[in-house]
Image (cartoon, helix red, strand yellow):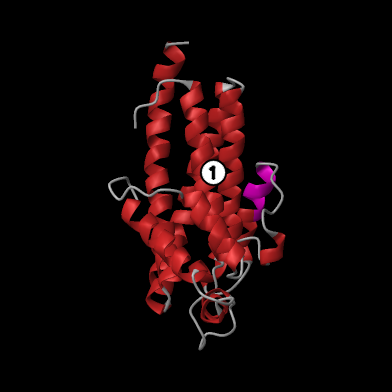
Amino acid sequence: MTIATAATLAEIAGRRGRTYWLLASGFAEAPRRALFGDLIAALGPVDPAEPLGVETAALADGAQAALSMDDEPPLLAIEFTRLFGAISKSHGGSPPFESVVRTGHWGGDAALEVIADYADADIAPPLPEAGPVDHLAAELRFLAIACHRESEAWQAEDTQAAMGWVRRERDFLDRHILRWVPEYCLKAADLAETPFYRALLTITPRACMLDRDDIDAILESVPALAANV
C-alpha cells in the first residue's frame, strides 16, 4: 500500500470502517430482503482481481440469490438462528461470542477485556441488541466506529489522534478478533448450508487479516507523511 497524504489515509480509513460495518450486519441482522439489497448496493461492482475480489463476489452472489427469492427466505432465517442463535451445542456450532470460543463459557476475563477496550475508547457497547458485548457483530462494529473516528482525525489533520486510533485498531485485532474469529468462522462455515452464509463466514476472517496487514503499512507510512508536511 502506497500512502502519500492525510486525505488518502482518511479515505482508506472510511473504506475500512464501511467494510467492518457491512460484515457486522450479516452477523447482527436476521436475513430479510432489505438487508440483502443494502449489501448488494454497498458492495457495488466487484473486481475479482482485487484483494478479496473472489470472496466479495461470492458474498454478492449469495445476497443476490437470496434477494431473488419470491418471499422472505425462510431457509436463511433458519440457518441464521442455527448458526448464530446459540440454541444448544447439539443444534449448530458455538455461538459467535469471543469468550465462548476462547474459553468454552461466556464471560470471564475475555469479556471483561472487551468491555475495558470499549470504555477506554469511549465507545458504548456497539450492538446492545445482539446481546453479549463480545458478540462478533459488536466487535466488528467497534472496529468500524474506530475506523470512522480515525478518518475524522485524518480529515482534521490531527496525525497524533489518527495514529492513536490506528494503534487501537491494531491492538483490538491482535488481542481479540484474530485470536478467535478465524477459528470460529472456519468451523461455522463447515456447518453453513447456504451460499450467503458460507460466503460471509469465509470473507470475514480474511478481511480482518488483510486489514491487519494494511494497518502495518499505515504505521510504516506515517513517518514519511510527517516528513513531507
Predominant secondary structure, magenta span: helix
Residue kind at label 1, given as amino acid type: Gly
Q: Is residue 67 magenta?
A: no
Vertical comparison of 209 with 37: above or below: above
The residue at 37%/76% (across/down) is 190
Vertical comparison of 66 with 166: above or below: below
Q: Position of residue 199 (x, y in %)?
A: 40, 65
Nearest to the observer: residue 39 or residue 133: 39
The residue identified by callout 1 is: 17
Nearest to the observer: residue 120 or residue 207: 207
Q: Position of residue 85 (x, y in %)?
A: 59, 77
- Magenta range: 115-120
Counting every numbered tag in the picture gives 1
Q: Is residue 170 visible?
A: yes
Is 88 displayed left or right of 199 in the figure?
right
Q: Secondary structure at mark 1?
A: helix
Q: Is residue 110 visible?
A: no
Q: Residue furthest front?
A: 70
Res 165 → quadrant: top right
Is 188 displayed left or right of 131 in the figure?
left
Res 179 → quadrant: bottom left
Q: Residues within 10 Å of mark 1 (few under 14, many from 20)?
A: many
Q: Position of residue 69 (x, y in %)?
A: 51, 74
Rendered-image quadrant of the N terminus: top left
The residue at 65%/48% (across/down) is 118
Vertical comparison of 68 with 2: above or below: below
The residue at 37%/33% (across/down) is 217
Q: Position of residue 21 (x, y in %)?
A: 56, 51
